[in-house]
Amino acid sequence: MKRLAAPGVLAVATRELRWMARDKVALFLVIGVPLFAFALLAATFSNAVVRDLRVSVVDADRTATSRIYVQAVTSAPVVTVAERSGDLTSAMHAIRSGAAIAAVYIPPDFERDFLARKRPQIMVFYNRQFFTPGNNAASAIAKAIDAATATLLPATGPAAGYRPGALVAEQYVLTNPALNFAQFLLRAVLPTVLHVVVAIAGGYAVGSEFSSRNPRAWLRAAGGSPLAALVGKLAPLFGVFILMMVLVAVIIHGLYQIPFRGDSLMMGASACLLVIAYLSIGALLQLLVRNLAIGLSLTAIFCSPAFGFAGVGFPLFGMGDFARVWGSLLPLRWYIQILFDQAARGLPTSVSAQPFAILAGIAGVAFMLAWLRLRATAKAPLRRAKETPAIEIDPHSGVGTAMVAEWRRVLGDSGAFSLIVLAPVIYGLFYPQPYLGQVLRNIPIAVVDQDGTELGRELVSTLNADEAVKVAARADTLADAQALLAKREVFAILEIPEGAQREILKGNPSRIAAYVDSAYFLLYNRTLQGISEAAGAVSQQIASGGARADGSLAHTALIRSSPVEVVSEPLFNPTGGYASYVVPAAFVLILQQTLLMGVATLGGVAFARGGREARRQRGGARFILGQALAHLCLAMPGVILYLIILPRFYGFSTLGQPLALFLFAAPFLLAVSFLAQFAGLWFKRRETAVLVFVATSLPLFFLVGVSWPQEAIPDAIRIASRIFPSTSAIDGLVRINQMGASLRDVSRDWMTLWALAAVYGLLTVAATHLLNRERMRDER
């Protein structure tokens, strides 16, 4: 006879492990989902350095000099000349359609003006709607043009006579000297994906007691102690997810060889607190509603947008008040700060003491609230959620009848209705909040002026006049400035060495050192931009000898220092707004994920209420088509909200025609519906859809090419990503709505979506036929 464990924590933990071993969905959620997400993200970021960004070149001069510049662009390591356009119109078409990320225009008479010292322009048009690839391409092209100009200067002959030296800002990259995107993004993305799984798993373990298990038996196994019941239930999950956190560290520091610079003990303790916090939050939400489906939906709404509020993409000091306050309530926000301070920046543990204490406080409060709620629930009478009866229709009914029946199912099911109709509204208001600051301004930096001359005072004044940065501190030594950097009071240090002005007056270049923290790439790029602009402005003023900026002497000095002007023109997102770049793409992904989970939920509901017979009724070709049309209509308000109303409300670029948007959105929504119906055929419970799909959102976002360049994604992953409708839909809808592309420009994406709709529709019909054959075989 098998001996049972004495009531208590161990008995509850043993009971939980046995349940997880029997419940395939729980096992897949806890182990399968994070492993799949980790593998996908690790493969996506396997090329840490961005290369081969496609560029279109328009050489309207076609001389030996212009060919030197074309060759310089062709030889640049980051970009590759994908096509030679005949004019700017065809180059713009290439950018809108995705054939190129940027275009280089060399005007007629370029060589003649160059030799005549008229400072001709080379225009660089780059797609800033695709933020990272566009900015990288523009920077690489500008460097290639400058290199080509440097090779031509000796041939044209430098100007005779005395010239003062130039001010040169030498950058010293702190934290991430190789500017490794994997070190920046992957370090934050993997824990972000895991925290969603942790919260959902904690909620599922507790919520399943009220849906399919027995909460009284749970408490009996704990000897009647709510504390022992909660600890025993969450303990096995805690152990599994700590191992997952170890796997995250192995991927980052082992597979990618990214150095760990800080205190491993503090980092391990922070990981434990993060897991405890989100297990407790998931449990608390379930205990509050005592309805598994609603509790999982609330958990997903709470956790899914957390990446934006954690300050990884857009810095915390650039957010509005609501985003900062809400972010401060999220355990992930404090864990990410500790992670970057310790693992990336290698700061003393004392710097991380405050966020560690806050994280510990949140974890403790969340666990205490879950325990108090469980104690109150234990005294309340047990109640089960009532399922409304299944809607049955005549098997000979047509598409219209199936469409109306599906409408009634969605409107009559709170879980499906919340996901398909209400969730897009909530996310539409909630998700953009961290990014609405759009552009970073007045980034605080420190200046260490060891020269103490007019040059330093002029440089500080110019820095403060630049909108990107402001001089927040004047430190006496580098050590004092570094202390401010460690406390996040400044994000860069500019050192003006002794004798800087003397070197300029002697005609030598004067080098100033810019130490810039690259832990967060947006901060790094924007800070470096402000410092470079200020140094360039001071250099130009020195070269002109104090002459009027618009005068001939200043112009002559400018030609001597820079004989070719590179004019970079950002397209479609000219202000470089972060929300304008990330939110439109995220909106399309939200449409997919909410519709996918909502429709797949209906498949699980059908089986739970009526078994195979109820599922069979949803599986005929006419019913599948009718249901898809119902989903199309139900999702259209979300399309209107995300593509027409909210972009104008938030001030994003909206160049697309509504008809083109709707024509493109139709196959996207149909493809998602058919995919969800196909997945729902295999689900036996309503909650399975949320458990399986909720953690896939962030990996799918990076597969599109908006944030992480497609050229940096391995070919196999890039091709495989096309099986998800969001990959083609985000690319196409963003190009139409934000870039003014026509359906012809995005015809490849449009046809891909129609193909996916057809394939998933046929798969659903075939799967239904297969399941029906199995049912008849079982009945015989």
Image (cartoon, grey):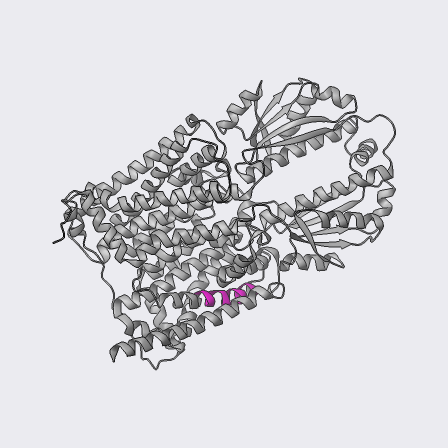
Residue 668 position, x and y percent, is 49, 65
Of the 4 image quadrants, the one containing the N terminus is bottom left
Q: Residue furthest left?
A: 1
Q: Is residue 690 above or below residue 342?
A: below
Q: Is residue 256 visible?
A: yes
Q: Is residue 395 left or right of residue 552?
A: left
The question of residue 394 being in magenta is answered with no
* Residue 308 visible from this viewpoint: no
Residue 671 within the magenta-colored segment of the rendering: yes
| Residue 36 x/y as whole percent | 42, 54
Considering the image in quadrants, where does the C terminus appear? Answer: bottom left
Residue sitting nearer the eye, 593 or 659: 593
Q: Position of residue 767 (x, y in %)?
A: 38, 72
Residue closest to the far front: 1
Task: Report whether 137 appears left or right of 541.
Answer: left
Q: Say which of 64 and 378 sits in front.
A: 64
For image coordinates 21% across by 50% down, the residue present is: 15
How many numbered marks have been drawn onto this rendered protein structure? 0
Q: Which residues are magenta?
A: 660-672
Direction from residue 365 to residue 534 in the image, left or right: right
Residue drawn at x 36%, y 70% is 406
Residue 713 placement (x, y as % from top left): 55, 53
Q: Residue sitting at 77 percent across and 43 percent down? A: 148
Image: 736 above or below 329: below
